[in-house]
Image: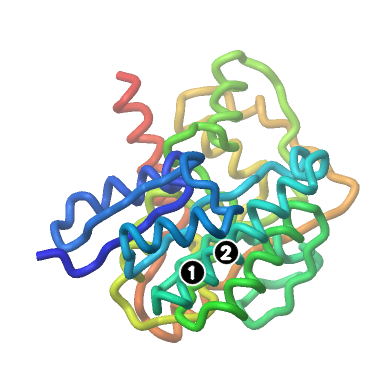
Amino acid sequence: MINQTIWITGAKGRLGPSIMEVLNHNREYKVIGTDIDVDITDLSQVEQMMQIYRPTVIINCAAVSGVAYCEANMVQAFKVNALGARNLAIAARGANCKLIHISTDDVFDGKKAGRWTEFDAPAPKSVYAKSKYAGEQYVSSLCPKHLIIRSSWVYGGSTGNDYFGEVVAKGKAGEVFNAPVDKVSTPTSADELCKFIVKMIDTVEYGIYHAACEGMCTRNEFAQFILGGMGYDVALAKGNFEPEQSSTLLDNLMMKMTEVHEMPHWQEALKAYVDKVKTKEA
């Protein structure tokens, strides 16, 4: 018996296909996935989808990402990341629908020495970060039943267009590359992030949740772990210093307080993903 109808936007992006795969195994869910076929920046198209499918939950994975790309395409970045989120929030509110909105650790400026909690004030610097934070603000102000999920250094998923893929490509080519020793956060497996997102569908939890794997590392340590796990020379990841030190280390404080879920350590999750990749390549 179907208990929830779930609409996933950005269903062909990094997270969307993984979430759909998990949800399609549960007969209690009817899952609708859309990508560029439904323009979330067009409110009339969003409302039409709501009228046709009447979802009870929307998971917004649609986004324009890439810091450099967003800097060069500011209008498109804000249109998708902010206006698109606004339209989904308006439609969700009208249908008394739960909106799960995927955001990012980039909403913080990276200047804090410790971990960022859900109660710290964002201070986005890049166009990408500002557009994502604008989307958060629209969602939180327009849709009462909202859940904003921030994560950090997400790798895996379906596209392969991520830091993991970049490092593996360098490893295969035997090419030396810079991997900063002064950029700190936590690598987070898309598989583990999807588990948390799916778990939150049937909860009555709302607000902002951080969902990053536990532990911490530098970008250099992240790269070396990937290289070593995949059987490449770890020395290819050359430690360097960036013009500005930064840390977007997230504390899953809300998750710990509500005890709804527990994320694994980043090394455990990354090893599992490396094994998964190596199995597929074998």
- Horizontal and vertical percent position of residue 23: 26, 54
Residue at image coords 40%, 54%: 8
Question: Is 160 placed left or right of 224 in the picture?
Answer: left
Residue at numbered disc 1: 91
Q: Secondary structure at mark 1?
A: helix
Residue sitting at the far left: 1
Residue at numbered disc 2: 87
- Horizontal and vertical percent position of residue 66: 69, 42
Question: Is 63 placed left or right of 100 in the picture?
Answer: right
**Camera-side residue: 133 or 163?**
133
**Camera-side residue: 272 or 62?**
62
Amino acid tagged 1: Ala
Question: Is 282 placed left or right of 230 in the picture?
Answer: left
User: Mark 2 touching mark 1, by CB under 8 A?
Assistant: yes
The Cα–Cα distance between marks 2 and 1, rounded to whole angstroms, is 6 Å
Question: Is 124 placed left or right of 88 in the picture?
Answer: right
Residue at image coords 60%, 13%: 173
Residue at image coords 78%, 41%: 73
